[in-house]
Image (cartoon, rainbow, N blue to C red):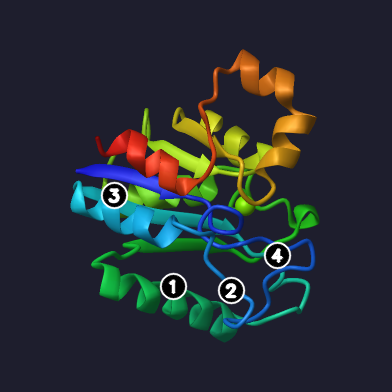
Amino acid sequence: MRLIVLDRDGVINEDSDAFIKSPEQWVPVPGSLEAIARLNRAGWTVAVATNQSGIARGYYDHATLSAMHQKLQGLLRPLGGRVDWISTSPYLDHHNSPARKPGAGMLRAIAARYGCELTGVPFVGDTWGDVQAAQAVGMQPILVRSGKGERTLASHAEDIAALNVPVHDNLATVAEALCP
Ligand SMILES: [Mg+2]
């Protein structure tokens, strides 16, 4: 089984500093849904690990989050794609939860769900916290420029170069690289 894990906001859908609070505000990054379908066709199982502190902040509830993910799956269906598993973390930093990235709790939960090792499994994200979470469990971090990616590149240029983190424009070019 070939597993790939994706961050959600800024990778699959457009991010906002004001949070994505409703299915209406949940808008795919151009090409991301086709990229997921392409990965699926090439035999990749796609899982998502997403911080959703908007729940702890009271911006939206679990039902609304679930509706966003139903929108995602509904848009993927006609493309022949699907996200197989979504792990969400509703916590804030001060909760000190290992399930909040840069903690790797969600990634460990995904490994437990599939009974697989995480070593070398690609994790695609747009923030430094995503890179740190991947590093913590031996995954292969991949940074995209979409979402907060450009900001991350600017703020952590040296770290990203030192770790040799592959950088892609967006999920579409990640899929292109993984599905020759
Ligand atoms: Mg993100």
Rendered position, 103 above or below 121? below
Sequence-wise first label, 2 or 4: 2
Q: Determine which quarter of the picture holds residue 21.
A: bottom right
The residue labelled by disc 3 is: 39
Sequence-wise first label, 1 or 4: 4
Sequence-wise first label, 1 or 2: 2
Secondary structure of residue under mark 4: loop
Which amino acid type is marked by label 3? Leu
The residue labelled by disc 1 is: 72
The residue labelled by disc 4 is: 53
Question: In the picture provided, is 38 more to the left or to the right than 87?
Answer: left
Q: Residue at x 40, y 62 (%)?
A: 33
Which one is closest to the eye, mark 4 or mark 3?
Answer: 3
Q: How far, Cα to Cα, is label 1 from label 4?
A: 19 Å
Q: Determine which quarter of the picture holds residue 78.
A: bottom left
Q: How far, Cα to Cα, is label 3 from label 1?
A: 16 Å
Q: Determine which quarter of the picture holds residue 59.
A: bottom right
Which amino acid type is marked by label 4? Ser
Secondary structure of residue under mark 3: helix
Q: Residue at x 45, y 79 (%)?
A: 71
The residue labelled by disc 2 is: 26
Q: Are marks 1 and 2 in contact (CB under 8 Å)?
A: yes
Rendered position, 158 above or below 59? above
Q: How far, Cα to Cα, is label 2 from label 3?
A: 21 Å
